[in-house]
Image (cartoon, rainbow, N blue to C red):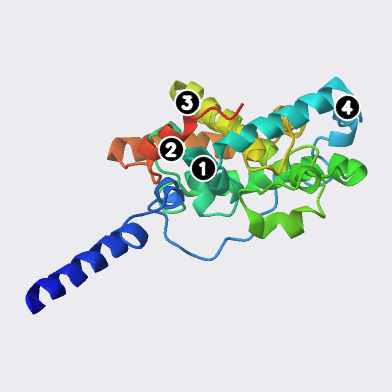
Amino acid sequence: MKRLRIRYILLICIIVLSMFGGYATASEVVASDSTPVVAPLPSLPGYLGKDNVPNSLVLLPPPPAPGSAELARDEDVAQRTFATRDTLRFDLAHVDYDLDFPRVAGTYSCSLNAPITEQDTPTLFRLLRRVKTDANLSTNAAKEFYHRQRPYMVNHEKTCAPEAEERLSKNGSYPSGHTTIAWTWALVLAEISPAQADAILLRARVFGENRNVCNQHWYSDVEWGRTMAAAVVARLHTSAEFLADLEVAKQELESVRAKGLAPTRNCRDEAAAMTIQPY
């Protein structure tokens, strides 16, 4: 009898552990990769320089006005994304919030079917860091001038990254810097690896949509972020240094493929998350 009681207690412990400690959460599954956990790398100077990046205040129209059809669309999209809570798509949105290197270098790893790491593709890795700086700087003028409130500041709903809410509240929502950066990367990578261009650009579209899913950006923020990315890439092609690095990056990626190195992300679960439509 005593032995049966002990077995019963052990069985209960196993069940509890399996419920709370034995399995990865959805976010852990989506976020899992083979990138070592290290301190974020600092920003690098861009190819263009602060005074040579496209001016978002000149290029973009004002954000949607109160009472406009565009603002109604923004609010409708935000509302519809709430259905993605507690799904892999919401977890992927949290993953996409993190723009720190070296981890963010894996964003397009599944799309490329190859890793991007400082060890295996040093020039491409550095190129993405520098391009991030250019893309980020290009959004500053409009962000600072309009200082648009972010969705969670208006609808008071949760975000995918609550740890960032206080900081982001001081940074304008329009246009989306994350989207500008992600689409800039995608356009560059599509040039480096044209055979994977569709997969890369699809991932970039999902990345931008995830800014809506995260409740940190409006639909129009994301929409015009893509425009800024196109402007940044056009300007990058006037930089001889960028063009030289682009050619080296192509060779590095070919070398990685020849070695058969695997992507650094969990591609199965990333693909599952991408099938969940946010609106």
Quarter of image, res 242: top right
Given the current orientation, which residue lies at the most extreme front position?
1
- Residue at mark 4: 61
Q: Amino acid at mark 2?
A: Glu
**Residue drawn at point x = 75 percent, y = 53 percent:** 168
Whichever of callouts 1 and 4 sits on the residue coming sooner in the sequence is: 4
Q: Secondary structure at mark 2?
A: helix
> Closest to the observer: 177 or 128?
177
In this rendering, the answer to whether 54 lies above or below 121 is above
Quarter of image, res 62: top right
Alpha-carbon distance for marks 3 and 1?
A: 17 Å
**Residue drawn at point x = 70 percent, y = 34 percent:** 78
Q: Is residue 103 left or right of residue 174?
A: left
Q: Nearer the viewer, mark 3 or mark 1?
A: 1
Alpha-carbon distance for marks 2 and 4?
A: 34 Å
Q: Residue 233, percent across and down?
A: 68, 31
Residue 185 appears in the picture as rendered = no
- Check residue 92 in the rendering and tell me which mark sits there, or answer none: 1
Q: Secondary structure at mark 3?
A: helix
Q: Residue 160, percent across and down?
A: 61, 48
- Residue at mark 2: 270
Whichever of callouts 3 and 1 sits on the residue coming sooner in the sequence is: 1
Q: Residue 66, percent across and down?
A: 91, 30
Alpha-carbon distance for marks 2 and 1?
A: 7 Å
Residue 45 appears in the picture as rendered = yes
Marks 2 and 4 close (CB-CB < 8 Å): no
Q: Residues within 10 Å of mark 1 (few under 14, many from 20)?
A: many
Quarter of image, res 170: bottom right
Q: Amino acid at mark 4?
A: Pro
